[in-house]
Amino acid sequence: MREIGVLDNVQQADLLADFLLSKGIKCHIDNDNSRYVLWALDDDLVATARAHLAAFRQNPGSSIYVEGARSARQIRSQELARRKEYRKNVKDIRSTWVLTASGGPTVVSGLLLAACIIAGIFTGLGANDNSVVPWLLFSTDMNWTELKEGELWRLVTPIFLHFGLMHIVFNAMWLMDLGPMIERRKGALWLVGFVLITAVASNFAQAYFVSPAFGGFSGVNYGLIGYAWIMGRRAPGSGIGLSNVAAGLAIAWGLLGIAGELVHHESWMANWAHGVGFAVGCFWAWAETEKSR
C-alpha cells in the first residue's frame, strides 16, 4: 500500500476514492489531523492514481467524478452480493463432516457411493483371502500384466476398493460432502468425466511410483478437494467452495502420510494418488476460472 496524495476536504477525498474505484483502483483514506491521505492498495496502480489526483485538483466539480461515484456504488453493491453468495455456499469446518450438508446425494455421487459400498461388501473390505479383490486392483503384479492384456477397467476400479471400515467411511464422508455440491452446479456428466480423469491419473501415479496393490476413493476425493478449494478462492460466486480450514486439514493429512513414508520407509497411505488427485483438481479449477478472466 502506497500513498497517492492528500486532500483537505473529506467530501472530495470520498469523491475521488469513488472515482478511482470506478477505474479499478481500490484505495483507503486516513484522517491525519483533518488532512485526508489516500492510499492505493495496489502498488502497481499508484502512478495512475496520482495522475487522476492531479486532474481532480484541476477540476473537482467535473461531472465525471459524479458518474464515478455512481459506478462505485454499483461496484460495492455487486461486491456485497458476491460476498453474501460466497458465505452462503462455502462450507466451514463444522459442516465439512456432515453427510447431508450439500442437501443429500445426487445421482452420480450416490452411484459412486453405492459402488464403493457394494465393492466393500463383496471384497470383505479388502480381505487378503477374498477372490474379488484381485479383479479390482490396478494390477496383480509389477509388470501390469492384466492391463497389457486389455483389462482397462483396472485404470479406474481401485477407487472402489477399500481396506477397513474407517477407510471407506472417511472417503464416503468427503464424497458425499463435495460430490453433490459440485454435481448440482456442474452437472452429472461433468462429474463423471472429472472422476474418470482424476481416477486414472491418481491411480496411474500410485501404481507407477509405488505399487499396483492399493485401493480407495481418496485420490478422487483429493481431486474434489483441490477443485472446490480453488473454485472457492478464484470464483466465489460459482457456488462451489471449501473453507481454508477444511482444505488445510486435508493437506495436513496428506503431509502426515508423506512424513510416515519418509520416517518408516514404507507407504501406509496412497500418497502419490493423493498428491496427483489434488494437483489435477487444483489445475482444473484454475484452468476453468482463468478462461473467464
Image: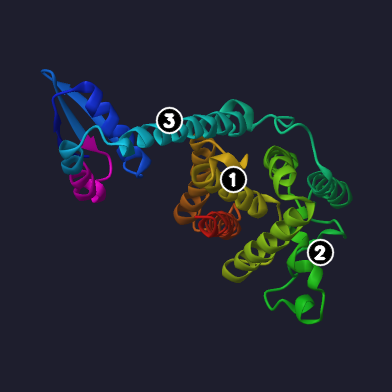
Q: Does the magenta segment cover residue 168?
A: no
**Residue at numbered disc 2:** 134
Q: Earlier in the sequence, mark 2 or mark 3?
A: 3
Q: Does the magenta segment cover residue 51?
A: yes
Q: Over which residues does the magenta segment extend?
A: 39-52
Residue beneath the point at 56% across and 47% down: 231
Asked if the residues shown at circle 1 and circle 3 are in contact, with their CB atoms under 8 angstroms apart, the answer is: no
Disc 3 is placed on an element classified as: helix
Image mark count: 3
Asked if the residues shown at circle 2 and circle 3 are in contact, with their CB atoms under 8 angstroms apart, the answer is: no
Disc 2 is placed on an element classified as: helix
Residue type at mark 3: give it: Arg
Residue type at mark 2: give it: Pro
Q: Is residue 237 left or right of residue 215?
A: left
Q: Residue furthest left?
A: 33
* Crowd around label 1: few <14 · some 14–19 · many ≥20 (10 Å): many
Residue 36 visible to an observer of this rendering: yes
Point out residue 262 in the picture as x, y percentages from the top left corner.
Answer: 45, 56
The numbered disc on residue 123 is none
Secondary structure mostly taken by the magenta-highlighted segment of the chain: helix
Q: Is residue 165 left or right of residue 247?
A: right
Residue beneath the point at 82% across and 59% down: 133
Disc 1 is placed on an element classified as: helix
**Residue at numbered disc 3:** 73
Above/below status of 243 relative to 112: above
Which quadrant would residue 201 be assigned to in this image? bottom right
